[in-house]
Image (spheres, grey):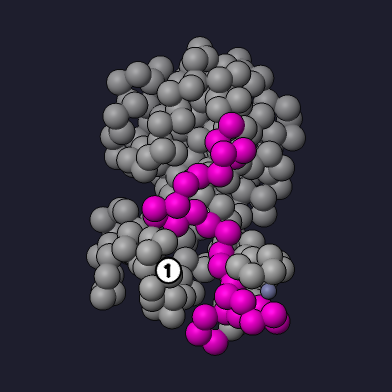
């Protein structure tokens, strides 16, 4: 495949690579993308996922939020795929400086990546809203109804819900890595969720590569576009 050879060449010439990823990176690990046509949108629930995953809904219908969240968002048996593993390998080799992800599943760290900037938080971290005590994803999964702290306070996942702001420190770190990179690979994201998608504007480096199943509005600015499953493409590298 000609594009794979081109991608190999671009990667071989970089030693300051940043990867910016979305749901498509995790779908090959069995984690559903609720925005894709075969994702959660087409499953039966009383409300659309974007309503359930909003801060207002979380506050007003916490029980229903957790019913959906446990059922659809906590995929604790998922394992990293070829894309996660390749990114971790590039970081160990000193080529890749950071993974910036919109995913909340912790699979990059499970694959061995260390510099992972989680724009939308992680299901693996949960805190009591009253005393800030930490709880694991298993604690949330195994609780009945709304998970509750020993102190009696409600436990909230450390994920950025719709209507909530992204963490300022996390954004600043992402901007720093993007603005210094010489190669940016955007993978498994259709770049429709803002403000996360707007971050790629900070990239000023030499080579932009987009790998996604469908076209994105960045394709025309990219040096190289590969359409397909990112795990499959990365396993060919
Ligand atoms: Zn507490």
Q: Which residue is drawn at 38% across and 73% down?
A: 60
Q: Does the magenta stretch include residue 162?
A: yes
SS at mark 1 in the image: helix
Closer to the camera, 61 or 47?
Answer: 61
Q: What quarter of the picture does the N terminus occupy?
A: top left
- Magenta-highlighted residues: 144-172
Q: Position of residue 61 (x, y in %)?
A: 38, 76
> Is residue 178 found left or right of 192 in the rendered image?
right
Q: Position of residue 54 (x, y in %)?
A: 38, 61
Residue under label 1: 58
Residue 169 vs 120, above or below: the answer is above
Label 1 packing within 10 angstroms: few (<14), some (14-19), many (20+): some
The image quadrant of residue 171 is: top right
Q: Position of residue 124 (x, y in %)?
A: 63, 62
Closer to the camera, 144 or 7?
Answer: 144
Q: Which residue is drawn at 67% across and 50% down?
A: 109
Residue at the front extreme of this rendering: 130
Residue 31 vs 67, above or below: the answer is above
């Amino acid at each position: 495949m000609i594009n794979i050879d081109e991608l190999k060449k671009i990667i071989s010439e970089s030693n300051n690579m940043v990867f910016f990823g979305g749901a498509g990176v995790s779908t090959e690990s069995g984690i559903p993308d609720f925005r894709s046509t075969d994702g959660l949108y087409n499953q039966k629930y009383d409300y659309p996922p974007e309503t359930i995953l909003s801060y207002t809904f979380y506050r007003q219908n916490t029980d229903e939020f957790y019913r959906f969240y446990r059922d659809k968002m906590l995929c604790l048996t998922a394992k990293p795929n070829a894309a996660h593993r390749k990114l971790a390998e590039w970081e160990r080799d000193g080529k890749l400086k950071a993974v910036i992800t919109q995913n909340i599943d912790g699979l990059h760290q499970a694959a061995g990546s260390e510099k992972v900037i989680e724009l939308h938080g992680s299901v693996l971290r949960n805190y009591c809203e009253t005393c800030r005590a930490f709880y694991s994803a298993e604690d949330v999964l195994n609780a009945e109804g709304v998970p509750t702290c020993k102190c009696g306070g409600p436990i909230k996942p450390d994920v950025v819900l719709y209507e909530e702001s992204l963490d300022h420190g996390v954004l600043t770190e992402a901007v720093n890595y993007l603005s210094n990179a010489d190669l940016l690979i955007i993978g498994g994201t259709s770049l429709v969720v803002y403000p996360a998608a707007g971050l790629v504007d900070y990239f000023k480096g030499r080579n932009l590569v987009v790998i996604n199943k469908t076209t994105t509005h960045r394709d025309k600015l990219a040096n190289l576009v590969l359409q397909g499953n990112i795990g499959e493409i990365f396993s060919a590298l």
